[in-house]
Amino acid sequence: MLEMSQTQQKLLFNAIVQKIPDFPFMKCYANKTSMACALPMVLDNLNEAIFLMYQGNPSFLYVNETATKMLGYSREEFINGMGIFDIDPSWTPEVTQRFLIKSKDEKMIRFTTRHKTKEGHNIPIDITVNRFYFEGKSYHLAVCREIVDRKSFVEEMFGKETCFKFKDVVDNSPNNIAWYDAECRVVYLNKQIQKYFDVPIESLIGKEVTVASFGETYAEYIEKLRSVIKTGIGIEYDQTFRFKDEEHVHHMQIVPELDKLGNVIGIIAIGRDVSMQKKAEKKIEFLAYHDHLTELPNRIRTKLEVENVIHKAQDDSMQMAILFIDVDDFQTVNDSFGHAVGDMLLKSVASRLQDNLRDNDMLSRHSGDEFLIILNNVHSNDVIASICERIVESFQKPLNIGTHILSSSVSIGISIYPIEGDDFDALVRKADIAMHKAKELGKNMFCFFESSMNEETIECFHALNDMKNAIANQEFILHYQPQIDIKNKKIMGAEALIRWMHPTQGLIAPSKFIPIAENSGLIIKIGEWVIKEACKQAMLWHQQGIEIVVAVNISTVQFKRGNLEEIVKEALATSGLSPEFFELELTESAMMYDTEKIRTTIQNLKALGVKLSIDDFGTGYSSLSYLKKFAVDKLKIDQSFIKNLLENQEDAAIVKAVIQMAKSLNLKTIAEGVEDGETLDALHGHGCDEVQGFHFARPMSIEAFEGFALYFKHNIH
């Protein structure tokens, strides 16, 4: 350390006495002479750094020990050639000129800036520069105090009034605002940040932001801070933090604080908590690509996945299969138990399907009770068949749906990429066609797509289009097959059977178009026409003296979904036919589920006075209790039992049992499909009431039926 000369001591003493008489140590020395002698020791123990310079000359004449400690330079480095411009090269000329007071009227200035240490650290300082004269020369004395208090520093930089306004605005901002110096040390944190920390934010001031002190979720954040400090380029991104065991997503903006030379002297980080927004965005995105009930991928998401798989398959020569799955008789569950149970069934079906898939397969809900399964990377039909067999077999076990135990099954159609197509829509369409074929073959099974199915589908499409205009064009006609009382040999009734006289294809059998009409729902409109036409024709026959009951077979679809009661009322009222001459034939499957709607419809129909018979009796699975509950009038024994009545003892036993049961319930029986006299005699022997079949007559046109009725009346006894 250099020794102070007597001249320096005297110079500094006069400067301090004249210019800074309020320094604390002045009060300790009443005797100025002793003060001057102790001056070197006193100055070296001050908290303030002291710099002495000639006016207009940036070189230092003197610095105290505090200055060397503050900035890291030795006293020799300061005195031997170092000047004010060397302390911080980043200072602009405006800053350095403030140390050199030039105005004659200006004696003292005070301002706040930063000093850069020898190691490159920036420290905030408060500087007071005094100008004084001694022995004809002008000197500058700079007294520098390091600002260690954040609040004081902000006040010094911006002024107290401005600072208070700034602090009030920033502390009450909904955003998280942090200020760091160039060493990534915390300078300022607003109040909003406090909720994320268990410790007071004041305790974090001055600390460097590190993973060790702030946690692992800060690692990326710290990296971003240091990147901005290094490059001077601001960034904006989303950052996930974990505070108090909760994850928060913040939208971050980190901007550099630059001096006039463009050097980074700090950074400001502004974070906005967007956690709720992100959750909402994820929810919206999820709903856009997933089914709300089962939470499975929806059709849109599945299409994207298939297109992606096809793209990969084109490169890797892989095969992919699409399974189109439909829940058999799902509408019956909805009609019987309500949509809430139906929804639970769909969720259970989805769960069971998922249990049968491989890890790389995908299950989605296509629509309604239809599901899609994407089988990735399959190389043989055997693998596909094995998975389908497993799925079908798994549904042999009933499903627990709330308080109900329901048996369910699925029908599956299969299309294979690239054999059946190279895009999603084509593959799904063909898998759908194959699924409908599985249903036609009896349900509860699977079918691979074949080109012939596509031809059938096209035919069905054309048939459906033609059927929509058939009623208006009067292309449908009714044929009637007589129903004969065995004992009295009288015509008791006639079953109305629809036929389609196509303008180009001729007469089309019901077996060809009725299934298409039922699947499309068009059967409801067709069924309404049949009821009205049959009632009208029966009334015309009555007027001719042919008083018989006309029977109409009602489709299950029409019975469950159509407005059957209103249609019958209107048909009877319009035709004038008495209700006891009109009979509705219902299948057992139509009455399989005892729902409120079914009960109400049947009770209202019976209240009108119409007759009710059960068609194809013996082929269903329902309880016999409905026979009395719904006041059934007649049982129609299915022709599958009548056909082999004479050769098959089991069929004969069934027919006999049905007739005996009906008599015990005071019901009539009619056997259909009677084709010979021996069968007729056997039925007569068992006590059957009525028959219909080719033995007497095939279904006939109106004119033919009228001729048959006249002949039968006069010639059959």
Image (cartoon, rainbow, N blue to C red):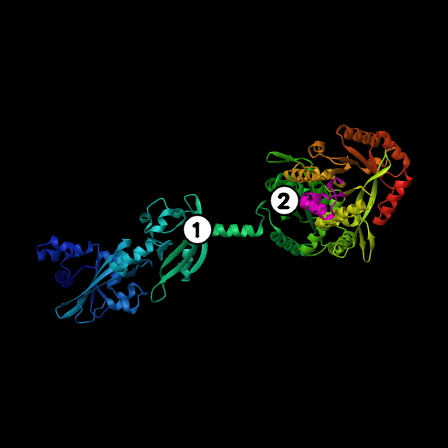
Amino acid type assigned to the residue bearing label 1 in the image: Ala
The x and y percentages for residue 547 are: 81, 42
Q: Secondary structure at mark 1?
A: helix
Please say whether residue 473 is visible from this viewpoint: yes
Foreground label between 1 and 2: 2
Residues 392 and 522: in front is 522
Kindly identify the residue that appears in the image at 32 percent across and 47 percent down.
203
Q: CA distance from mark 1 to mark 2?
A: 34 Å
Location of residue 545 (image quadrant): top right
Q: Is residue 584 left or right of residue 109?
A: right
Name the amino acid, label 2. Asp
Foreground pick, 514 / 578: 578
Which one is in front, 243 or 131? 243
Residue denoted by label 2? 359
Left or right side of 309 for 714:
right
Overall secondary structure of the magenta section? helix
Residue underneath mark 1: 219
The magenta stretch spans residue 593 = no
Is residue 573 shown in magenta?
A: yes
Q: Secondary structure at mark 2?
A: loop
Q: In the rendered structure, which segment of residues is drawn in magenta? A: 552-580
Q: Please provide percent x and percent y for residue 509.
A: 81, 49
Residue furthest to the right: 715
Question: Dot 2: within a 10 Å radius of its alpha carbon, few (fewer than 14), some, or many (20 or more) residues?
Answer: few
x, y percent for residue 575: 74, 48
1 or 2: tag closer to the N-terminus: 1
The quadrant of the image that shows the C terminus is top right
Specify the quadrant that holds the N terminus: bottom left
Total marks placed: 2
